[in-house]
Image (tube, grey):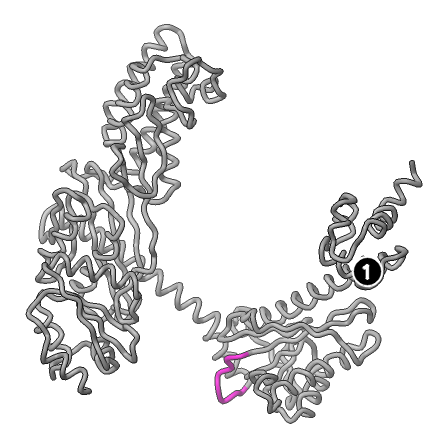
């Protein structure tokens, strides 16, 4: 330890608060403690630490503390500091999505049901949270069909009734704006909707069933069919939320799954005894940490901006869980119980959440492994196939594009660790070759590229590739390699012929054929296709601009400067033709006579026809 650390450790107070571990002034970890003196000292004593903590402590050269009056204040402060600084060694909840709610402004004369991203103390009723906006829209659609609440934003009641909208005509609104219902009739439907949102589906279903039978008795079969469809919709929603609890409580159920590297938290949302959804959150890095510590850190970040349920069930919790419970009560602004059930129905919910977390972590790892096979794994396989001693991290692909030798261009695309690095892509205009000579064009391009790589000027120097792909067979490869060697560079290079996807090496007569399912083959095909696409796109753009440019040559009084200005401003002849005289005049360098000349030339065919 340096002198700064020793001095600060000796003067640590016996107080709750937060500590901020630093390396060269950068905050790398934020923690909270009931007793800062004991907690911070423990990091620097010769005691056992997990590999992650040991790595963090080895980097610490300074720390700061922030005192708090209570453990709850320390928890809130820790949450805010983590959110502000995003330290490297903290458990970070990177999936910062929020659950939407349904909001009903019961204080309005004619309330609406709307989607809300956050709850607020505004006197309205909030229901949820729901898993995703699509779930909210499903429920809102059902409310409109069943209870016919208005969706418009008009200020009601109006002094004079208006004309009802289409929603009234199709049975989706009671049309209070047009005086088609009284405020009492509308309020009754609002109360039924609130009961429905509270989870009382059966009462609403029974009422609708009675209405359907009554309509059938009166031979109002069309109305009876509409009510029947609403009942079917309610039953469908119930089936999607059929995981019931014997207690009609709001609960959040949280469990954890982890491997040696990462962790996955699963949250099940139970409202009025019914599970309305669940979500999982990836936590990068804390796989070897104690589960109770990971869950504690997750709770702090998960409920930052969210309202907890009446009960929060967790798989495990640290010893100072009372502070977490106080934190949840503070967030809820009401009673909130934090539990770690060991048996019974609540334990079964924990096991269900853990099963979801296990499944999500397994799928994430499988996806990560597939991504690795397609990228880094493909690079490793390609290196073995080509006999390279190291794995090719930077792979460059080249292609030539022209139209019968006109406007010849080349492309250079770059893949790093199997992924396209588009900021490294480059275009080339062929300068020294006339006609359609792809061999000579490739020779010029590679000569220019590798001279940049061999340059002594840091401003001009480009990074050297690990491997170069040439689109073509042995002849194209021979010309390309000759051009590269002439610059003094010597980088592994191979050609890929399209007919059978054969790989050609400079010092080998026989070609290499890879399995069609080989990740290495898929990688080099992506490089080849991307270089071709990039070259074609550049060539097409140049050809289009050249066509327009040559046509503009015929306009009297329009020189190179004005042609460039017109092309830059409008981009195409079609856009110029659709422009008004005033718009043409506004182009930089244009005046009224020049604009009139351009306008007359662009519309000359129409004038002649008329």
| Foreground pick, 329 / 122 | 122
- Where, quadrant-wise, is the C terminus in this rendering? top right
- Position of 93 with respect to 426 (left or right) is left
Quadrant assignment, res 545 = bottom right
- At a point 22% along the width and 68% down the height, the residue shown is 30
Q: Which residue is mark 1?
A: 549
| Foreground pick, 143 / 266 | 143
- Where, quadrant-wise, is the N terminus in this rendering? bottom left
Q: Is residue 393 magenta?
A: yes
Q: Is residue 390 magenta?
A: yes
Q: Which SS type dominates the magenta stretch?
A: loop
Q: How many marks?
A: 1
First to last magenta residue range: 387-394
| Foreground pick, 296 / 501 | 296
Q: Residue furthest right?
A: 608
Quadrant assignment, res 192 = top left
Q: Position of residue 518 (x, y in %)?
A: 52, 72
- Position of 155 with respect to 307 (left or right) is right
Q: Residue furthest left?
A: 14
Find numbered disc 1 in the image and state the secondary structure of the residue it sits on: helix
Residue 508, relative to residue 100: is it above or below? Answer: below
Q: Position of residue 176 (x, y in %)?
A: 39, 17
Q: Position of residue 544 (x, y in %)?
A: 77, 59
Q: Residues within 10 Å of mark 1 (few under 14, many from 20)?
A: some
| Foreground pick, 595 / 354 | 595
Q: Position of residue 270 (x, y in %)?
A: 22, 42
């Amino acid at each position: 330890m340096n002198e700064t650390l020793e001095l600060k450790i000796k003067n640590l107070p016996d107080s709750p608060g937060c500590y901020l571990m630093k390396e060269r002034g950068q905050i790398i970890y934020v923690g909270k403690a009931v007793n800062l003196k004991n907690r911070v000292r423990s990091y620097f004593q010769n005691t056992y630490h997990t590999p992650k903590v040991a790595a963090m402590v080895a980097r610490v050269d300074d720390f700061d503390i922030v005192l708090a009056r209570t453990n709850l204040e320390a928890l809130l402060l820790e949450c805010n500091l983590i959110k502000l600084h995003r330290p490297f060694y903290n458990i970070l909840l990177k999936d910062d999505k929020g659950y939407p709610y349904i909001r009903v402004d019961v204080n309005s004369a004619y309330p609406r049901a709307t989607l809300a991203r956050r709850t607020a103390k505004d006197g309205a009723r909030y229901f949820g949270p729901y898993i995703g906006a699509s779930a909210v829209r499903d429920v809102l659609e059902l409310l409109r069909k069943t209870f016919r609440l208005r969706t418009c934003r008009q200020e009601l009641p109006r002094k004079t009734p208006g004309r009802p909208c289409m929603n009234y005509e199709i049975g989706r609104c009671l049309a209070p704006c047009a005086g088609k219902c009284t405020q009492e009739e509308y309020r009754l439907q609002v109360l039924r909707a609130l009961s429905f949102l509270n989870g009382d589906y059966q009462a609403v279903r029974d009422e609708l069933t009675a209405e359907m039978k009554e309509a059938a008795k009166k031979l109002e079969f069309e109305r009876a069919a509409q009510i029947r469809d609403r009942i079917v919709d309610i039953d469908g929603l119930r089936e999607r939320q059929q995981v019931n609890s014997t207690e009609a409580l709001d609960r959040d159920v949280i469990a954890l799954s982890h491997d040696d590297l990462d962790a996955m938290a699963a949250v099940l949302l139970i409202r009025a005894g019914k599970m309305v959804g669940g979500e999982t959150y990836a936590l990068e890095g804390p796989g070897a940490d104690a589960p109770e510590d990971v869950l504690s850190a997750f709770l702090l970040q998960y409920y930052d901006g969210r309202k907890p349920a009446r009960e929060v069930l967790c798989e495990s919790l640290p010893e100072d869980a009372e502070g977490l419970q106080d934190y949840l009560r503070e967030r809820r602004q009401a009673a909130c119980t934090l539990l770690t059930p060991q048996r019974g129905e609540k334990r079964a919910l924990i096991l269900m959440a853990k099963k979801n977390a296990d499944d999500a972590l397994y799928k994430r790892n499988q996806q990560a492994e597939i991504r690795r096979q397609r990228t880094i794994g493909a690079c490793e396989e390609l290196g073995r196939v080509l006999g390279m001693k190291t794995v090719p991290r930077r792979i460059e692909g080249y292609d030539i594009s022209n139209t019968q030798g006109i406007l010849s261009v080349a492309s250079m695309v770059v893949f790093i660790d199997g992924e396209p690095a588009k900021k490294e892509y480059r275009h080339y205009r062929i300068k020294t070759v006339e006609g359609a000579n792809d061999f000579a064009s490739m020779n010029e391009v590679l000569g220019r590229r590798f001279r940049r790589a061999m340059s002594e000027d840091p401003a001009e120097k480009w990074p050297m590739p690990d491997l170069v792909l040439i689109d073509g067979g042995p002849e194209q490869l021979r010309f390309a390699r000759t051009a590269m060697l002439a610059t003094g560079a010597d980088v592994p290079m191979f050609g890929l012929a399209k007919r059978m996807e054969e790989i050609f090496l400079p010092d080998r007569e026989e070609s290499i054929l890879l399995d069609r399912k080989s990740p290495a083959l898929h990688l080099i095909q992506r490089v080849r296709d991307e270089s071709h696409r990039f070259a074609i796109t550049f060539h097409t753009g140049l050809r289009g601009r050249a066509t327009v440019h040559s046509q503009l040559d015929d306009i009297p009084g329009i020189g190179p400067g004005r042609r460039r200005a017109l092309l830059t401003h409008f981009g195409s002849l079609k856009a110029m033709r659709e422009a008004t005289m005033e718009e043409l005049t506004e182009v930089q360098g244009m005046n009224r006579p020049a604009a009139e000349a351009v306008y007359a030339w662009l519309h000359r065919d129409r004038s002649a026809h008329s």
